[in-house]
Amino acid sequence: MLRPPRRLPRPPRRAAATATGPGRRLLLSTPIFYANGPPHIGHLYSALLADALHRHRGLRGAGPGRLSTGTDEHGLKIQQAAAAAGTSPPELCERVSGLFRQALTQAAVSFTDFTRTSEPRHQRAVRHFWGALRDSGALYKGSYEGWYCTPEECFLPESQLAERRDAQGRPCKVSLETGHQVHWTKEENYMFRLSAFRDPLRKWLRDNPRAISPDPFYQNVLRWLDEDLPDLSVSRERSRLQWGIPVPSDSTQTIYVWVDALVNYLSVVGYPERHGEWWPAAHHVVGKDILKFHAVYWPALLMAAGLAPPERIFVHSHWTVRGQKMSKSLGNVIDPSACIGQYTLDGFRYFLLRQGVPERDCDYYDEKVVKLVNSELADALGGLLNRSTALSINPSNTYPCFSESCFPKVLDYRETNGIGRASAEDYEFVASVASLPLQVASYFEGFQIYKALECIALCVRQTNSFFQRHRPWKLDRKDPAEQLWLDTIIHVTLECLRVFGTLLQPVIPHAADKLLSRLGVEPEERGLSSLTFLPRYSGKPCPFEGRQLGPDTGVLFHRLERPRQHQTETKKL
Ligand code: MSP
Protein backbone atom coordinates (compact mmCIF):
# COMPACT_ATOMS: atom_id res chain seq x y z
CA MET A 1 0.00 0.00 0.00
CA LEU A 2 1.35 3.41 -0.92
CA ARG A 3 1.14 6.46 1.28
CA PRO A 4 -2.18 8.35 1.10
CA PRO A 5 -1.82 11.90 -0.23
CA ARG A 6 -1.11 14.46 2.47
CA ARG A 7 -3.08 17.01 0.53
CA LEU A 8 -4.25 17.37 -3.02
CA PRO A 9 -1.73 18.88 -5.35
CA ARG A 10 -2.82 22.13 -6.91
CA PRO A 11 -2.45 22.66 -10.63
CA PRO A 12 0.57 24.91 -11.22
CA ARG A 13 0.22 28.32 -12.79
CA ARG A 14 0.33 28.52 -16.52
CA ALA A 15 3.83 28.88 -17.95
CA ALA A 16 4.72 32.34 -19.28
CA ALA A 17 5.16 30.94 -22.78
CA THR A 18 1.50 29.95 -22.89
CA ALA A 19 0.01 33.26 -21.79
CA THR A 20 -2.81 34.44 -24.03
CA GLY A 21 -2.17 36.94 -26.78
CA PRO A 22 -0.78 36.91 -30.27
CA GLY A 23 2.12 34.64 -31.03
CA ARG A 24 1.37 32.11 -28.34
CA ARG A 25 2.03 28.44 -28.90
CA LEU A 26 -0.72 25.87 -29.18
CA LEU A 27 -0.81 22.10 -29.36
CA LEU A 28 -3.84 20.74 -31.17
CA SER A 29 -4.36 17.01 -30.98
CA THR A 30 -6.40 14.21 -32.46
CA PRO A 31 -6.94 11.14 -30.30
CA ILE A 32 -4.37 8.46 -30.96
CA PHE A 33 -6.00 5.62 -32.84
CA TYR A 34 -6.19 2.01 -31.68
CA ALA A 35 -3.86 -0.06 -33.80
CA ASN A 36 -6.20 -3.07 -33.88
CA GLY A 37 -7.95 -2.41 -37.18
CA PRO A 38 -7.80 -0.19 -40.26
CA PRO A 39 -8.91 3.46 -40.26
CA HIS A 40 -12.55 4.32 -40.91
CA ILE A 41 -14.36 7.58 -41.54
CA GLY A 42 -15.07 8.12 -37.84
CA HIS A 43 -11.34 8.24 -37.18
CA LEU A 44 -10.86 10.52 -40.14
CA TYR A 45 -13.57 12.85 -38.87
CA SER A 46 -11.76 13.33 -35.53
CA ALA A 47 -8.56 14.06 -37.43
CA LEU A 48 -10.17 16.43 -39.96
CA LEU A 49 -11.77 18.53 -37.26
CA ALA A 50 -8.39 18.96 -35.59
CA ASP A 51 -6.72 19.59 -38.93
CA ALA A 52 -9.22 22.29 -39.92
CA LEU A 53 -8.71 24.05 -36.56
CA HIS A 54 -4.94 23.80 -36.95
CA ARG A 55 -4.97 25.12 -40.51
CA HIS A 56 -7.38 27.91 -39.57
CA ARG A 57 -5.11 28.96 -36.74
CA GLY A 58 -2.07 28.89 -39.05
CA LEU A 59 -3.87 31.12 -41.57
CA ARG A 60 -4.68 33.57 -38.78
CA GLY A 61 -0.98 33.80 -38.02
CA ALA A 62 -1.84 33.01 -34.42
CA GLY A 63 1.62 31.78 -33.40
CA PRO A 64 3.54 28.51 -33.46
CA GLY A 65 1.26 25.52 -33.56
CA ARG A 66 1.55 21.76 -33.61
CA LEU A 67 -0.94 19.13 -34.64
CA SER A 68 -0.32 15.80 -33.00
CA THR A 69 -1.75 12.42 -33.85
CA GLY A 70 -0.58 8.83 -33.67
CA THR A 71 -1.46 5.29 -32.71
CA ASP A 72 -2.47 3.74 -29.39
CA GLU A 73 -0.66 0.44 -29.49
CA HIS A 74 -0.77 -1.22 -26.07
CA GLY A 75 -3.45 -3.08 -24.15
CA LEU A 76 -5.48 -6.23 -24.10
CA LYS A 77 -7.45 -5.25 -27.16
CA ILE A 78 -4.34 -5.09 -29.31
CA GLN A 79 -2.86 -8.20 -27.68
CA GLN A 80 -6.05 -10.13 -28.54
CA ALA A 81 -6.35 -8.66 -32.05
CA ALA A 82 -2.77 -9.76 -32.81
CA ALA A 83 -3.47 -13.27 -31.50
CA ALA A 84 -6.65 -13.47 -33.59
CA ALA A 85 -4.77 -12.32 -36.70
CA GLY A 86 -2.05 -14.93 -36.02
CA THR A 87 0.61 -12.27 -35.64
CA SER A 88 2.55 -10.58 -32.85
CA PRO A 89 1.47 -7.25 -31.32
CA PRO A 90 4.55 -5.38 -32.65
CA GLU A 91 3.91 -6.66 -36.16
CA LEU A 92 0.23 -5.80 -36.05
CA CYS A 93 0.97 -2.32 -34.69
CA GLU A 94 3.65 -1.66 -37.28
CA ARG A 95 1.20 -2.50 -40.06
CA VAL A 96 -1.85 -0.69 -38.66
CA SER A 97 0.12 2.36 -37.57
CA GLY A 98 1.39 2.59 -41.15
CA LEU A 99 -2.20 2.44 -42.42
CA PHE A 100 -3.22 5.34 -40.18
CA ARG A 101 -0.22 7.42 -41.18
CA GLN A 102 -1.03 6.74 -44.81
CA ALA A 103 -4.75 7.50 -44.42
CA LEU A 104 -4.09 10.79 -42.62
CA THR A 105 -1.51 11.82 -45.19
CA GLN A 106 -3.86 10.90 -48.03
CA ALA A 107 -6.54 13.07 -46.43
CA ALA A 108 -4.05 15.98 -46.20
CA VAL A 109 -4.18 16.05 -42.40
CA SER A 110 -1.31 18.43 -41.72
CA PHE A 111 0.01 16.71 -38.60
CA THR A 112 3.38 17.84 -37.30
CA ASP A 113 3.87 14.92 -34.91
CA PHE A 114 2.88 11.25 -35.06
CA THR A 115 3.32 9.43 -31.76
CA ARG A 116 3.35 5.67 -31.45
CA THR A 117 2.92 4.57 -27.85
CA SER A 118 5.43 1.77 -28.48
CA GLU A 119 8.18 4.37 -29.08
CA PRO A 120 10.90 4.58 -26.40
CA ARG A 121 10.52 8.38 -25.95
CA HIS A 122 6.83 7.93 -25.17
CA GLN A 123 7.43 5.01 -22.82
CA ARG A 124 10.01 7.06 -20.96
CA ALA A 125 7.47 9.86 -20.53
CA VAL A 126 4.85 7.41 -19.24
CA ARG A 127 7.27 5.95 -16.70
CA HIS A 128 8.13 9.44 -15.51
CA PHE A 129 4.45 10.40 -15.29
CA TRP A 130 3.78 7.28 -13.25
CA GLY A 131 6.59 8.28 -10.91
CA ALA A 132 5.01 11.73 -10.48
CA LEU A 133 1.64 10.12 -9.61
CA ARG A 134 3.28 7.75 -7.16
CA ASP A 135 5.34 10.50 -5.53
CA SER A 136 2.26 12.66 -5.03
CA GLY A 137 0.60 9.84 -3.08
CA ALA A 138 -2.20 9.51 -5.61
CA LEU A 139 -1.67 5.77 -6.13
CA TYR A 140 -2.29 2.85 -3.80
CA LYS A 141 -2.37 -0.89 -4.34
CA GLY A 142 -5.68 -2.61 -3.82
CA SER A 143 -7.67 -5.60 -4.82
CA TYR A 144 -10.01 -4.68 -7.63
CA GLU A 145 -12.85 -6.60 -9.15
CA GLY A 146 -15.42 -5.65 -11.72
CA TRP A 147 -16.76 -6.10 -15.24
CA TYR A 148 -14.02 -5.33 -17.77
CA CYS A 149 -14.87 -4.39 -21.36
CA THR A 150 -11.84 -5.09 -23.53
CA PRO A 151 -12.95 -3.18 -26.66
CA GLU A 152 -13.48 -0.09 -24.48
CA GLU A 153 -10.46 -0.95 -22.30
CA CYS A 154 -12.24 -0.07 -19.04
CA PHE A 155 -14.21 -1.42 -16.10
CA LEU A 156 -17.93 -0.68 -16.27
CA PRO A 157 -20.36 -0.27 -13.35
CA GLU A 158 -23.55 -2.42 -13.21
CA SER A 159 -25.58 0.65 -14.25
CA GLN A 160 -23.87 0.58 -17.65
CA LEU A 161 -24.50 -3.11 -18.33
CA ALA A 162 -27.31 -5.09 -19.91
CA GLU A 163 -28.16 -8.83 -19.94
CA ARG A 164 -27.85 -10.57 -23.33
CA ARG A 165 -27.14 -14.03 -24.74
CA ASP A 166 -23.82 -14.81 -26.41
CA ALA A 167 -23.38 -16.64 -29.76
CA GLN A 168 -23.89 -20.00 -28.00
CA GLY A 169 -27.10 -18.80 -26.34
CA ARG A 170 -25.54 -18.51 -22.90
CA PRO A 171 -26.54 -15.51 -20.76
CA CYS A 172 -23.86 -12.82 -20.62
CA LYS A 173 -23.44 -9.18 -19.77
CA VAL A 174 -22.72 -6.47 -22.30
CA SER A 175 -21.90 -2.76 -22.24
CA LEU A 176 -25.12 -0.76 -22.62
CA GLU A 177 -23.33 1.86 -24.67
CA THR A 178 -21.45 -0.32 -27.17
CA GLY A 179 -23.03 -3.78 -26.86
CA HIS A 180 -19.61 -5.38 -26.27
CA GLN A 181 -19.42 -8.32 -23.91
CA VAL A 182 -17.80 -7.71 -20.51
CA HIS A 183 -15.89 -10.19 -18.35
CA TRP A 184 -15.62 -10.43 -14.57
CA THR A 185 -12.07 -9.59 -13.59
CA LYS A 186 -10.52 -9.76 -10.15
CA GLU A 187 -6.98 -8.51 -9.69
CA GLU A 188 -4.42 -6.82 -7.49
CA ASN A 189 -4.07 -3.43 -9.16
CA TYR A 190 -2.66 0.00 -8.52
CA MET A 191 -5.54 2.37 -7.92
CA PHE A 192 -5.64 6.11 -8.62
CA ARG A 193 -7.45 8.27 -6.05
CA LEU A 194 -9.85 9.73 -8.58
CA SER A 195 -12.48 10.22 -5.88
CA ALA A 196 -10.29 12.85 -4.24
CA PHE A 197 -10.40 15.00 -7.38
CA ARG A 198 -14.11 15.72 -7.54
CA ASP A 199 -13.81 19.24 -6.13
CA PRO A 200 -10.66 20.24 -8.03
CA LEU A 201 -12.34 19.04 -11.24
CA ARG A 202 -15.50 20.98 -10.48
CA LYS A 203 -13.47 24.09 -9.75
CA TRP A 204 -11.51 23.69 -12.96
CA LEU A 205 -14.75 23.50 -14.94
CA ARG A 206 -16.42 26.35 -13.08
CA ASP A 207 -13.37 28.57 -13.67
CA ASN A 208 -13.14 27.55 -17.33
CA PRO A 209 -16.63 27.45 -18.80
CA ARG A 210 -15.16 27.03 -22.30
CA ALA A 211 -12.98 24.09 -21.29
CA ILE A 212 -15.35 21.62 -22.95
CA SER A 213 -17.27 22.49 -26.12
CA PRO A 214 -20.00 22.24 -27.32
CA ASP A 215 -21.83 23.13 -24.14
CA PRO A 216 -24.05 20.00 -23.83
CA PHE A 217 -20.86 17.96 -23.32
CA TYR A 218 -19.64 20.41 -20.68
CA GLN A 219 -22.94 19.88 -18.86
CA ASN A 220 -22.54 16.08 -19.19
CA VAL A 221 -19.17 16.22 -17.49
CA LEU A 222 -20.55 18.38 -14.67
CA ARG A 223 -23.29 15.77 -14.19
CA TRP A 224 -20.74 12.94 -14.06
CA LEU A 225 -18.99 14.82 -11.30
CA ASP A 226 -22.22 14.74 -9.29
CA GLU A 227 -22.41 10.97 -9.64
CA ASP A 228 -20.34 8.23 -8.06
CA LEU A 229 -16.65 8.82 -8.78
CA PRO A 230 -14.85 5.65 -7.72
CA ASP A 231 -11.07 5.35 -7.69
CA LEU A 232 -9.63 4.18 -10.97
CA SER A 233 -7.70 0.98 -11.52
CA VAL A 234 -4.54 2.09 -13.34
CA SER A 235 -2.64 -1.14 -13.84
CA ARG A 236 -3.29 -4.74 -14.89
CA GLU A 237 -1.58 -7.92 -13.79
CA ARG A 238 1.31 -8.60 -16.11
CA SER A 239 0.28 -12.27 -16.31
CA ARG A 240 -2.88 -11.17 -18.14
CA LEU A 241 -1.48 -8.22 -20.03
CA GLN A 242 2.06 -8.39 -21.29
CA TRP A 243 1.67 -5.94 -24.15
CA GLY A 244 2.14 -2.66 -22.33
CA ILE A 245 4.56 -0.62 -20.25
CA PRO A 246 5.55 -2.32 -16.98
CA VAL A 247 4.90 -0.37 -13.79
CA PRO A 248 8.27 1.09 -12.75
CA SER A 249 9.74 -0.97 -9.93
CA ASP A 250 6.89 -3.52 -10.01
CA SER A 251 7.29 -5.83 -12.96
CA THR A 252 4.21 -7.86 -11.97
CA GLN A 253 1.98 -5.02 -13.20
CA THR A 254 1.41 -3.29 -16.56
CA ILE A 255 0.35 0.37 -16.74
CA TYR A 256 -3.32 0.80 -17.74
CA VAL A 257 -3.53 1.52 -21.44
CA TRP A 258 -5.56 4.71 -20.99
CA VAL A 259 -2.93 6.26 -18.69
CA ASP A 260 -0.31 5.23 -21.22
CA ALA A 261 -2.31 6.66 -24.15
CA LEU A 262 -3.25 9.98 -22.54
CA VAL A 263 0.36 10.75 -21.78
CA ASN A 264 0.96 10.97 -25.54
CA TYR A 265 -0.23 14.59 -25.28
CA LEU A 266 2.73 15.26 -23.00
CA SER A 267 5.34 13.05 -24.56
CA VAL A 268 4.81 14.81 -27.87
CA VAL A 269 5.87 18.12 -26.36
CA GLY A 270 8.97 16.71 -24.73
CA TYR A 271 7.75 15.67 -21.27
CA PRO A 272 9.35 15.52 -18.78
CA GLU A 273 12.06 18.01 -19.79
CA ARG A 274 10.67 20.46 -22.35
CA HIS A 275 6.86 20.32 -22.11
CA GLY A 276 6.70 23.66 -20.26
CA GLU A 277 7.08 25.52 -23.55
CA TRP A 278 3.74 24.10 -24.71
CA TRP A 279 1.77 22.64 -21.87
CA PRO A 280 -1.05 23.41 -20.89
CA ALA A 281 -1.77 25.31 -24.11
CA ALA A 282 -3.36 22.19 -25.56
CA HIS A 283 -6.68 21.71 -27.35
CA HIS A 284 -7.82 18.09 -27.66
CA VAL A 285 -10.35 16.96 -30.27
CA VAL A 286 -12.13 13.81 -29.08
CA GLY A 287 -15.20 11.73 -29.86
CA LYS A 288 -18.00 11.63 -27.29
CA ASP A 289 -17.19 7.99 -26.45
CA ILE A 290 -13.86 9.01 -24.96
CA LEU A 291 -14.99 12.19 -23.24
CA LYS A 292 -14.85 10.80 -19.70
CA PHE A 293 -11.24 9.72 -20.21
CA HIS A 294 -10.30 13.19 -21.43
CA ALA A 295 -12.49 15.42 -19.27
CA VAL A 296 -12.41 13.54 -15.98
CA TYR A 297 -9.53 11.06 -15.78
CA TRP A 298 -6.95 13.07 -17.74
CA PRO A 299 -7.34 16.39 -15.88
CA ALA A 300 -7.35 14.53 -12.55
CA LEU A 301 -4.22 12.59 -13.49
CA LEU A 302 -2.54 15.81 -14.61
CA MET A 303 -3.41 17.60 -11.39
CA ALA A 304 -2.10 14.66 -9.40
CA ALA A 305 1.14 14.80 -11.38
CA GLY A 306 1.46 18.53 -10.66
CA LEU A 307 0.37 19.76 -14.09
CA ALA A 308 -2.55 21.90 -15.25
CA PRO A 309 -5.45 20.40 -17.26
CA PRO A 310 -5.53 21.07 -21.00
CA GLU A 311 -7.04 24.39 -22.02
CA ARG A 312 -9.87 23.07 -24.14
CA ILE A 313 -11.52 19.81 -25.15
CA PHE A 314 -13.58 19.80 -28.33
CA VAL A 315 -16.06 16.97 -28.52
CA HIS A 316 -17.82 15.47 -31.52
CA SER A 317 -20.51 12.85 -32.01
CA HIS A 318 -20.45 9.79 -34.23
CA TRP A 319 -21.09 8.80 -37.80
CA THR A 320 -23.60 6.04 -38.36
CA VAL A 321 -24.03 4.31 -41.71
CA ARG A 322 -27.53 4.21 -43.15
CA GLY A 323 -28.85 4.60 -39.64
CA GLN A 324 -26.69 1.86 -38.11
CA LYS A 325 -23.65 1.99 -35.88
CA MET A 326 -20.48 1.38 -37.89
CA SER A 327 -19.06 -2.00 -36.94
CA LYS A 328 -16.87 -4.75 -38.30
CA SER A 329 -19.52 -7.36 -37.50
CA LEU A 330 -22.19 -5.50 -39.51
CA GLY A 331 -19.68 -5.14 -42.35
CA ASN A 332 -20.62 -1.50 -42.86
CA VAL A 333 -17.33 0.18 -41.95
CA ILE A 334 -16.55 2.96 -44.40
CA ASP A 335 -13.00 3.12 -45.72
CA PRO A 336 -11.69 6.70 -45.96
CA SER A 337 -9.26 5.83 -48.71
CA ALA A 338 -12.05 4.49 -50.95
CA CYS A 339 -14.08 7.64 -50.21
CA ILE A 340 -11.22 9.93 -51.14
CA GLY A 341 -10.67 7.89 -54.30
CA GLN A 342 -14.30 8.22 -55.21
CA TYR A 343 -15.19 11.72 -54.04
CA THR A 344 -11.74 13.38 -54.18
CA LEU A 345 -9.79 14.66 -51.25
CA ASP A 346 -11.54 18.03 -51.11
CA GLY A 347 -14.96 16.59 -51.84
CA PHE A 348 -14.78 14.13 -48.98
CA ARG A 349 -13.21 16.55 -46.51
CA TYR A 350 -15.92 19.07 -47.37
CA PHE A 351 -18.66 16.50 -46.90
CA LEU A 352 -17.50 15.32 -43.47
CA LEU A 353 -16.89 18.80 -42.11
CA ARG A 354 -20.01 20.35 -43.63
CA GLN A 355 -22.37 17.55 -42.59
CA GLY A 356 -20.82 16.52 -39.29
CA VAL A 357 -22.54 18.26 -36.39
CA PRO A 358 -20.56 17.84 -33.15
CA GLU A 359 -23.66 17.83 -30.94
CA ARG A 360 -25.40 14.91 -32.63
CA ASP A 361 -24.73 11.74 -34.58
CA CYS A 362 -24.76 12.04 -38.34
CA ASP A 363 -25.70 9.46 -40.87
CA TYR A 364 -23.48 8.54 -43.78
CA TYR A 365 -24.57 7.28 -47.15
CA ASP A 366 -22.91 7.61 -50.53
CA GLU A 367 -25.74 9.44 -52.29
CA LYS A 368 -25.60 12.18 -49.66
CA VAL A 369 -21.95 12.90 -50.45
CA VAL A 370 -22.61 13.09 -54.17
CA LYS A 371 -25.59 15.39 -53.75
CA LEU A 372 -23.88 17.82 -51.38
CA VAL A 373 -20.56 17.98 -53.17
CA ASN A 374 -22.15 18.38 -56.59
CA SER A 375 -24.48 21.12 -55.52
CA GLU A 376 -22.16 23.16 -53.31
CA LEU A 377 -18.68 22.60 -54.72
CA ALA A 378 -19.14 21.64 -58.37
CA ASP A 379 -22.22 23.67 -59.30
CA ALA A 380 -22.34 26.63 -56.92
CA LEU A 381 -18.68 27.41 -56.24
CA GLY A 382 -17.09 25.91 -59.36
CA GLY A 383 -19.88 27.22 -61.59
CA LEU A 384 -19.48 30.73 -60.19
CA LEU A 385 -15.74 30.74 -60.85
CA ASN A 386 -16.28 29.37 -64.30
CA ARG A 387 -18.94 31.89 -65.23
CA SER A 388 -17.17 34.92 -63.82
CA THR A 389 -13.82 34.15 -65.42
CA ALA A 390 -15.10 32.93 -68.80
CA LEU A 391 -13.29 34.63 -71.66
CA SER A 392 -16.64 35.51 -73.25
CA ILE A 393 -17.43 37.71 -70.27
CA ASN A 394 -13.94 38.79 -69.25
CA PRO A 395 -11.86 38.70 -72.46
CA SER A 396 -8.92 40.59 -70.91
CA ASN A 397 -8.58 37.86 -68.26
CA THR A 398 -7.95 40.49 -65.59
CA TYR A 399 -9.42 41.42 -62.22
CA PRO A 400 -11.60 44.24 -63.54
CA CYS A 401 -12.14 47.66 -61.96
CA PHE A 402 -14.84 48.57 -59.50
CA SER A 403 -16.87 51.66 -60.28
CA GLU A 404 -18.07 53.76 -57.34
CA SER A 405 -20.61 55.42 -59.58
CA CYS A 406 -22.24 52.05 -60.31
CA PHE A 407 -22.02 50.83 -56.71
CA PRO A 408 -21.83 53.99 -54.57
CA LYS A 409 -21.36 53.76 -50.84
CA VAL A 410 -24.68 54.38 -49.09
CA LEU A 411 -25.62 54.78 -45.48
CA ASP A 412 -28.92 52.97 -45.81
CA TYR A 413 -29.24 50.41 -48.58
CA ARG A 414 -33.03 50.71 -48.57
CA GLU A 415 -32.67 54.20 -50.07
CA THR A 416 -30.65 53.43 -53.17
CA ASN A 417 -33.24 54.50 -55.74
CA GLY A 418 -31.73 56.35 -58.60
CA ILE A 419 -28.11 56.39 -57.52
CA GLY A 420 -25.81 53.87 -59.13
CA ARG A 421 -26.94 50.55 -60.55
CA ALA A 422 -26.80 48.32 -57.52
CA SER A 423 -30.10 47.35 -55.92
CA ALA A 424 -31.01 47.09 -52.24
CA GLU A 425 -30.59 43.33 -52.59
CA ASP A 426 -27.02 43.85 -53.85
CA TYR A 427 -26.16 45.98 -50.84
CA GLU A 428 -27.61 43.38 -48.53
CA PHE A 429 -25.63 40.62 -50.19
CA VAL A 430 -22.36 42.57 -50.09
CA ALA A 431 -22.95 43.24 -46.38
CA SER A 432 -23.41 39.54 -45.69
CA VAL A 433 -20.17 38.60 -47.49
CA ALA A 434 -18.38 41.43 -45.63
CA SER A 435 -19.41 39.93 -42.30
CA LEU A 436 -18.45 36.39 -43.35
CA PRO A 437 -14.78 36.33 -42.20
CA LEU A 438 -15.70 37.31 -38.64
CA GLN A 439 -18.62 34.92 -38.56
CA VAL A 440 -16.44 32.06 -39.79
CA ALA A 441 -13.74 32.88 -37.24
CA SER A 442 -16.25 32.82 -34.42
CA TYR A 443 -17.70 29.49 -35.57
CA PHE A 444 -14.22 27.96 -35.72
CA GLU A 445 -13.54 29.31 -32.24
CA GLY A 446 -16.73 27.64 -30.96
CA PHE A 447 -15.98 24.31 -32.73
CA GLN A 448 -18.88 24.75 -35.11
CA ILE A 449 -17.03 24.29 -38.36
CA TYR A 450 -20.19 22.98 -40.03
CA LYS A 451 -21.89 26.30 -39.31
CA ALA A 452 -18.99 28.22 -40.81
CA LEU A 453 -19.39 26.13 -43.96
CA GLU A 454 -23.13 26.63 -43.97
CA CYS A 455 -22.62 30.42 -43.93
CA ILE A 456 -20.07 30.25 -46.73
CA ALA A 457 -22.42 28.06 -48.80
CA LEU A 458 -25.20 30.60 -48.27
CA CYS A 459 -22.98 33.45 -49.44
CA VAL A 460 -21.90 31.45 -52.50
CA ARG A 461 -25.59 31.03 -53.36
CA GLN A 462 -26.18 34.76 -52.87
CA THR A 463 -23.24 35.57 -55.14
CA ASN A 464 -24.64 33.31 -57.83
CA SER A 465 -27.98 35.08 -57.53
CA PHE A 466 -26.25 38.47 -57.78
CA PHE A 467 -24.47 37.38 -60.94
CA GLN A 468 -27.61 35.84 -62.41
CA ARG A 469 -29.77 38.84 -61.50
CA HIS A 470 -27.64 41.27 -63.48
CA ARG A 471 -27.05 39.04 -66.51
CA PRO A 472 -23.62 40.46 -67.25
CA TRP A 473 -23.47 38.47 -70.50
CA LYS A 474 -26.31 40.64 -71.83
CA LEU A 475 -24.49 43.92 -71.20
CA ASP A 476 -23.16 45.77 -74.24
CA ARG A 477 -19.44 46.24 -73.69
CA LYS A 478 -19.27 48.82 -76.50
CA ASP A 479 -21.28 51.18 -74.35
CA PRO A 480 -18.82 52.69 -71.78
CA ALA A 481 -21.52 52.94 -69.08
CA GLU A 482 -22.46 49.30 -69.54
CA GLN A 483 -18.80 48.29 -69.55
CA LEU A 484 -18.31 50.02 -66.17
CA TRP A 485 -21.23 48.12 -64.69
CA LEU A 486 -20.09 44.84 -66.26
CA ASP A 487 -16.61 45.29 -64.76
CA THR A 488 -18.13 46.12 -61.38
CA ILE A 489 -20.29 42.99 -61.39
CA ILE A 490 -17.26 40.84 -62.16
CA HIS A 491 -15.08 42.70 -59.66
CA VAL A 492 -17.62 42.11 -56.88
CA THR A 493 -18.00 38.46 -57.86
CA LEU A 494 -14.26 37.85 -57.90
CA GLU A 495 -13.92 39.60 -54.55
CA CYS A 496 -16.53 37.23 -53.14
CA LEU A 497 -14.73 34.24 -54.65
CA ARG A 498 -11.45 35.45 -53.16
CA VAL A 499 -13.06 35.60 -49.71
CA PHE A 500 -14.64 32.15 -50.13
CA GLY A 501 -11.37 30.65 -51.37
CA THR A 502 -9.43 32.14 -48.48
CA LEU A 503 -11.93 30.98 -45.87
CA LEU A 504 -12.23 27.50 -47.36
CA GLN A 505 -8.50 26.75 -47.23
CA PRO A 506 -8.68 24.84 -43.90
CA VAL A 507 -11.38 22.57 -45.30
CA ILE A 508 -10.67 22.08 -49.02
CA PRO A 509 -6.98 22.98 -49.25
CA HIS A 510 -6.39 21.83 -52.83
CA ALA A 511 -9.50 23.30 -54.43
CA ALA A 512 -9.02 26.54 -52.48
CA ASP A 513 -5.46 26.76 -53.78
CA LYS A 514 -6.69 26.22 -57.32
CA LEU A 515 -9.36 28.87 -56.92
CA LEU A 516 -7.02 31.46 -55.42
CA SER A 517 -4.36 30.76 -58.03
CA ARG A 518 -6.91 31.27 -60.77
CA LEU A 519 -7.79 34.65 -59.25
CA GLY A 520 -4.10 35.58 -59.18
CA VAL A 521 -3.95 35.70 -55.37
CA GLU A 522 -0.34 35.19 -54.28
CA PRO A 523 0.48 32.74 -51.44
CA GLU A 524 1.36 35.62 -49.08
CA GLU A 525 -2.05 37.21 -49.77
CA ARG A 526 -4.02 34.24 -48.48
CA GLY A 527 -3.85 34.84 -44.74
CA LEU A 528 -6.95 35.41 -42.66
CA SER A 529 -5.67 38.28 -40.57
CA SER A 530 -5.20 40.49 -43.62
CA LEU A 531 -8.36 39.38 -45.42
CA THR A 532 -10.26 42.35 -46.79
CA PHE A 533 -13.40 42.35 -48.88
CA LEU A 534 -14.30 44.89 -51.52
CA PRO A 535 -12.09 47.69 -50.21
CA ARG A 536 -13.02 49.85 -53.21
CA TYR A 537 -16.56 50.13 -51.86
CA SER A 538 -15.13 51.92 -48.83
CA GLY A 539 -12.88 54.09 -50.98
CA LYS A 540 -9.72 52.11 -50.28
CA PRO A 541 -7.40 50.72 -52.96
CA CYS A 542 -7.79 47.13 -54.05
CA PRO A 543 -4.42 45.47 -54.77
CA PHE A 544 -6.03 43.02 -57.17
CA GLU A 545 -7.74 45.56 -59.42
CA GLY A 546 -6.32 45.48 -62.92
CA ARG A 547 -4.18 42.45 -62.13
CA GLN A 548 -3.85 39.62 -64.63
CA LEU A 549 -5.76 36.54 -63.51
CA GLY A 550 -3.88 33.29 -62.99
CA PRO A 551 -3.87 30.54 -65.63
CA ASP A 552 -7.05 28.60 -66.28
CA THR A 553 -6.19 25.10 -65.08
CA GLY A 554 -9.61 23.66 -65.78
CA VAL A 555 -12.81 23.00 -63.92
CA LEU A 556 -12.53 23.75 -60.19
CA PHE A 557 -14.50 20.71 -59.19
CA HIS A 558 -15.80 17.96 -61.46
CA ARG A 559 -19.32 16.72 -60.82
CA LEU A 560 -19.35 13.34 -59.09
CA GLU A 561 -21.00 10.26 -60.49
CA ARG A 562 -23.68 8.44 -58.51
CA PRO A 563 -21.82 5.58 -56.78
CA ARG A 564 -22.59 1.90 -57.03
CA GLN A 565 -23.82 0.69 -53.63
CA HIS A 566 -21.39 -0.04 -50.80
CA GLN A 567 -18.41 1.02 -52.84
CA THR A 568 -16.71 2.69 -49.96
CA GLU A 569 -16.76 -0.08 -47.36
CA THR A 570 -13.50 -1.14 -45.87
CA LYS A 571 -11.55 -4.23 -46.83
CA LYS A 572 -10.48 -6.81 -44.24
CA LEU A 573 -7.13 -6.15 -42.56
N1 MSP B 1 -7.20 4.99 -28.57
C1 MSP B 1 -8.32 5.68 -28.08
C2 MSP B 1 -8.01 7.16 -27.94
C3 MSP B 1 -6.86 7.47 -27.04
S1 MSP B 1 -6.51 9.18 -27.01
C4 MSP B 1 -5.46 9.36 -25.78
C5 MSP B 1 -9.49 5.53 -29.06
N2 MSP B 1 -9.16 5.18 -30.28
S2 MSP B 1 -10.22 4.89 -31.46
O1 MSP B 1 -9.43 4.49 -32.58
O2 MSP B 1 -11.21 3.95 -31.02
O3 MSP B 1 -10.98 6.21 -31.72
C6 MSP B 1 -10.33 7.37 -32.15
C7 MSP B 1 -11.32 8.47 -32.45
O4 MSP B 1 -12.22 8.06 -33.47
C8 MSP B 1 -12.19 8.85 -31.25
O5 MSP B 1 -12.30 10.25 -31.17
C9 MSP B 1 -13.52 8.27 -31.58
O6 MSP B 1 -14.60 8.98 -31.03
C10 MSP B 1 -13.52 8.41 -33.09
N3 MSP B 1 -14.50 7.54 -33.68
C11 MSP B 1 -14.55 6.18 -33.65
N4 MSP B 1 -15.71 5.78 -34.26
C12 MSP B 1 -16.41 6.86 -34.65
C13 MSP B 1 -17.56 7.07 -35.42
N5 MSP B 1 -18.32 6.08 -35.84
N6 MSP B 1 -17.85 8.34 -35.76
C14 MSP B 1 -17.06 9.41 -35.41
N7 MSP B 1 -15.97 9.24 -34.71
C15 MSP B 1 -15.73 8.02 -34.12
O7 MSP B 1 -10.61 5.76 -28.67
Image (spheres, helix red, strand yellow):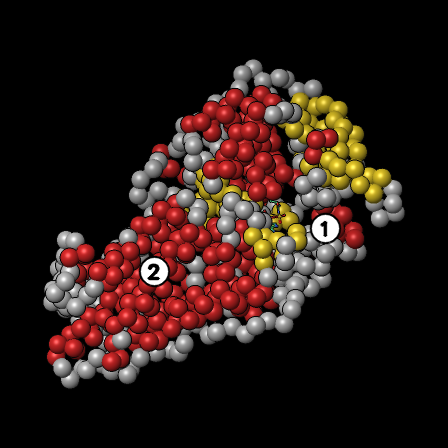
User: Where, by quadrant of the figure, is residue 198 drawn?
Assistant: top right
Give 199 or 160, whichever is nearer the viewer. 160
Name the spot of residue 192 as percent of width and height, x first.
63, 26
Q: Is residue 99 above or below residue 46?
A: below
Q: Could you give the CA–CA distance between mark 2 and mark 1, rounded to whole angstroms?
A: 51 Å
Name the spot of residue 199 as percent of width and height, x first.
52, 21
Task: Check disc 2 and report the residue beneath it.
Answer: 459
For the residue marked with disc 1, what is the amino acid?
Pro
Q: Quadrant of the N terminus?
A: top right
Give 177 or 502, whichever is nearer the viewer. 177
For the residue marked with disc 2, what is the amino acid?
Cys
Q: Which residue of the protein is positioned furthest toward the top in this rendering?
A: 6
Q: Residue at x 52, y 37 (%)?
A: 217
Closer mark to the observer between disc 2 and disc 1: 2
Q: Callout 1: 10 Å neighbours few (<14), some, many (20+)?
A: many
Name the spot of residue 378 as percent of width and height, x first.
43, 71
Task: Check disc 1 and report the residue beneath it.
Answer: 89
28 relative to 326 in the view: left or right? left
Residue 71 in view of the camera: no
Q: Earlier in the sequence, mark 2 or mark 1?
A: 1
Q: Quadrant of the C terminus?
A: bottom right
